[in-house]
Image (spheres, rainbow, N blue to C red):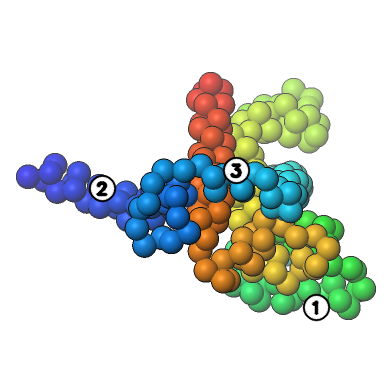
Amino acid sequence: MVNALKYLYVGAVYLVLYAPLLVTICFSFNDSVSADAWFGFTVKWYERLFADKSLINSALRSLFLAASTATTSTVVGTIIAIALHRYRFIGQKVVYGSLSVIMLSPEIIQGISLVMIFVILGIPLGFSTLLLSHTVFCFPFVTITVLVRLKGVNRNLAEAGADLGASDVDIVRFILIPLILPAVFAGWLISFTLSIDDVIISFFVGGKNYEILPMKIYSMVRTGIQPDVNALCAALFFATFAVVMLSYRLVRNRK
């Protein structure tokens, strides 16, 4: 009886999580502009989707921005995590607190604050402001992820390296980095996902000359959910699923 209830609960959770995705994917093959009923199977919405050059360009811009943001955030977040773990300095608690503030602050507040800074400094809105804003938004997640992994690393390894004559750079390069590499990769994936999915901050700092995919989708759904939007959501889901499976495979092979 207990096992049956447990499986029933797990099934209900998965149903709530994935039922909307399944409905979206199914209706992306619906041969009708109406989402009220099924009128037959078709792939014309995917053909229309991949023939839309403006949409493809927006997707490519988003991928490039997300990859750049993830890489920058990973470098910055990993350096800060190593510094917080290995060294003691004035204001360390302030740094810890600021990371939490950034992570917990509403995105709309971050977006308004950042666009005000860019306007005051006279920085034109576009790719550079998007990259800076997304990096500010994402790097705390990398820092926390790497820091948790660092706390599980045996400190005797670094001390043994120092006793054998290794410098701080050598200890970080040859001891810490290989041990925290899975966490660094996980932080990169988190940053990539957060960046490619962000709408609120991008709305304020993106400008008109650099339209990315989330803003394109937002403009498409303002007049109602169209079948090509369903096709786009399904394509994004399959792409995300492929990335997750690839990362899982890489981590498993590394273990």
**What amino acid is labelled 3 in the image?**
Glu
Residue 50 percent coordinates (x, y): 65, 44
Q: Amino acid at mark 2?
A: Val
Query: What amino acid is found at the position of numbered circle 1 in the picture?
Result: Met
Q: Residues within 10 Å of mark 3 (few under 14, many from 20)?
A: few
Residue named by callout 1: 116
**Residue 138 located left or right of residue 43:** right
Q: Horizontally, is 170 left or right of 95 in the view?
A: right
Residue named by callout 2: 10
Given residues 93 and 122, the one toward you in this image is 122
Quadrant of the drawing holding the N terminus: top left
Where 114 sits versus 80, above or below? Answer: below
Q: Of helix, strand and loop, which one carries label 2?
A: helix
The residue shown at (46%, 43%) is: 42
On the image, the x and y values in percent for residue 96 come to 64, 61
Q: What residue lies at 56% left-to-right and 23% top-to-bottom?
A: 254
Q: Residue 47, which numbered label?
A: 3
Res 68 visible: yes
Distance (Cα) linking label 3 and label 2:
37 Å
Q: Secondary structure at mark 1?
A: helix
Task: Look at the numbered disc 3 and give the secondary structure of its residue.
Answer: helix
Camera-nearest label, 3 or 2: 3
Q: Find out whether the residues at labels 3 and 2 contact each other: C-beta distance under 8 Å.
A: no
Q: Residues within 10 Å of mark 2 (few under 14, many from 20)?
A: few
Q: Which of the two labelled residues, at mark 3 and mark 2, occupies the earlier sequence position?
A: 2
Q: Identify which residue, 148 or 197, lies in the foreground.
A: 197
Q: Report the residue at 36% width, 62% height from top.
A: 36
* 134 vs 48, nearest the viewer: 48
Report crowding for label 1: few under 14, some 14 to 19, many 20 or more residues within 10 A (C-alpha). some
